Image (spheres, grey):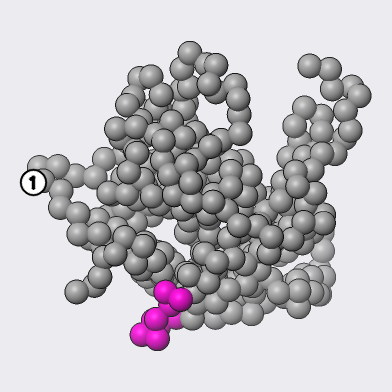
Amino acid sequence: MDISGMSPTRSFNNPDSARGEDYHPQDGPIKIQNPHIATMEEDYLYHIALGDKTHDLHEMFNDVKFVCFGGSPTRMLKFAEFMKEQLRIKIPAGMTLYNIANGSDRYVIYKTGPVLSVSHGIGIPSLSIIMHEILKLLQHAECSGVTLFRIGTSGGLGLEAGSVVITSEAVDGNLRQYMEVAIMGMVVKLPSFLDKELCQELLAMASEDDHFQTIIGKTMCTHDFYEGQARLDGAFCDYTQADKMAFLRRIHDKGIRNIEMESLCFAAYCHRANIRGAVICVTLLDSLNGDQITTPHNVMEEWNNRPQQVVARLIKKKLGISDE
């Protein structure tokens, strides 16, 4: 394909003028936007070691209604175990939860009833790969009415450590609400809108009995843990403490309440696939007060559970499962 005459920039749905309020994802069948898949002899999902001919994906995954992504394989196993208890799923004696993607060492996938628990690694490139393959898996399995969640950790801005942030808007390091992807010599802009109704549904799951606050706020997604997030503790740093604080205060004034490294891609792919999705993260520190994460491990473990608890409550409500 000759790309010499192509425009250097291409936009989907004109992200510079589109509004997130106009985004209303559908609850129907998963339909990915790639006509080439249907012409392939087999679609092999390399990074999770599954194929649409070598495996009966319909039999394995057709009942999936929720896909929950998180960075760490260990954390997503713990989430799967937590959901097993929440959904009252009984596993026969001598059996256990099984990593369905065990043919690869890149990601993990656990299934507890209609809920998939999937690790995505760190950053946009790693998340992008697994989202491509999970979306294709859901189409091959003929799933319908699926909701996606990213459940993770982040750095907070002006919030007490351990707070939970539900992302209203995912923006890049320049506060733009789209993800730029270089495709065949073009810079493609993908809008990163999220389902606002789903955000409100998640917020409604916060309980007065919770010993932490849950809020809705904007999330800045960066390509780097250190300089991209204005940290002073990386191997390289060409700015001052005053520069850092001025930047953080400026983005805080624009509504940014946490910073992480995946929300932009997650939102862009949910929007492009027209599927409901939400990002909910716990804050591990207030970046306005420093860069180092020194909280004891046992406290961090409890904090990691907080967004999981909120998501689990919504899943149970959707499935009609009470706490009684």
Task: Examine the structure image and report whether residue 12 is included in the region drawn in magenta.
Answer: no
For the point 25% across and 56% down, which residue is it? 84
Kindly tell me whether residue 177 is visible in this rendering: yes
Amino acid residing under circle 1: Ala
Q: Residue furthest left?
A: 93
For the point 34% across and 56% down, which residue is it? 79
For the point 79% across and 16% down, which residue is it? 1
Which secondary structure, mark 1? loop
For the point 40% across and 86% down, which residue is it? 208
35 left or right, relative to 18: left
Q: Nearer the viewer, residue 308 or 54?
A: 54
Q: Residue furthest bottom?
A: 208
**Location of mark 1 (residue):** 93
Image location (x, y in percent) of residue 14: 80, 49
Image location (x, y in percent) of residue 132: 55, 36
Figure check: 229 above or below 105: below
Considering the whole magenta stretch, tell me its main secondary structure: loop
> What range is drawn magenta here?
204-212
Image location (x, y in percent) of residue 232: 71, 64
Quadrant holding the C terminus: bottom left
Figure check: 43 above or below 219: above
Figure check: 208 above or below 315: below
Q: Residue furthest top?
A: 41
* Residue 5, quarter of picture: top right
Kindly tell me whether residue 220 is visible in this rendering: no
> Badge 1 local density, few (<14 within 10 Å), some, or many (20+)?
few
236 left or right, relative to 306: right
Image location (x, y in percent) of residue 304: 42, 65
